[in-house]
Amino acid sequence: MNIGDVSKMAGVPAKTIRYYEDIGLIKPSRSRNGYRSFQKTDAHKLAFLGRARALGFSIADCRNLLQLYEDDSRNSAEVKKIAQEHMREIEQKIRDLDDMRGTLASLIAACAGDHRPDCPILSSLGDAGNI
């Protein structure tokens, strides 16, 4: 099948498929005229990668997860370790976002939002002490 067909089947944009090929995540065969030719297994790998990326796994993690997925003698502890590390990263991002929300909420509350030019939001953003 061609790239458009596999894109629809796997739910992954053609541009992403080309990128995955460029970085070696997938290796579709090529026809005599040079066109990519995808098999059902390629569509399955692409769908796998699409779901992994939707969960926020990095390209490096996706590469490792795909290798483990294709390895029948894999150790599930390796998969769990990758997922646990990713969970720790997500939890840190949530803490960082909570901090940002708190800071922004304080700045918004401190701003009168009226016709006067003084604004604590702009003052905070322009604070040279943060450089």
Image (cartoon, rainbow, N blue to C red):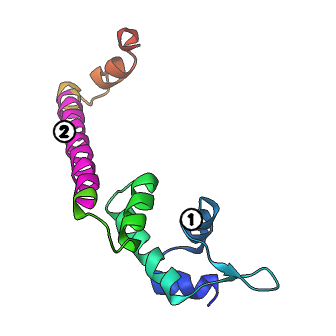
Viewer-nearest of discs 2 and 1: 1
Badge 2 vs badge 1, beta-carbon distance below 8 Å: no
**Distance CA(mark 2)–CA(mark 1):** 31 Å
Describe residue 64's horizontal placement relative to residue 3 as left or right. Answer: left
Q: Which disc is residue 20 wearing?
A: 1
User: What amino acid is at disc 2?
Assistant: Arg
The magenta segment is 79-106
User: What amino acid is at disc 1?
Assistant: Tyr
Residue nearest the observer in this picture, 47 or 29:
29
Image quadrant assignment for residue 63: bottom left
Q: Secondary structure at mark 2?
A: helix
Q: Residue at x 81, y 86 (%)?
A: 32
Q: Residue at x 46, y 55 (%)?
A: 59
Q: Which residue is mark 2?
A: 95
Q: Is residue 73 above or below residue 4?
A: above
Residue closest to the far top: 129
Residue nearest the observer in this picture, 62 or 121:
62
- Figure disc tally: 2
* Dominant SS in magenta: helix
Image quadrant assignment for residue 83: bottom left
* Within-10-Å neighbours for mark 2: few <14, some 14–19, many 20+: few
Q: Does residue 82 belong to the magenta stretch? A: yes
x then y, percent, for residue 90: 25, 48
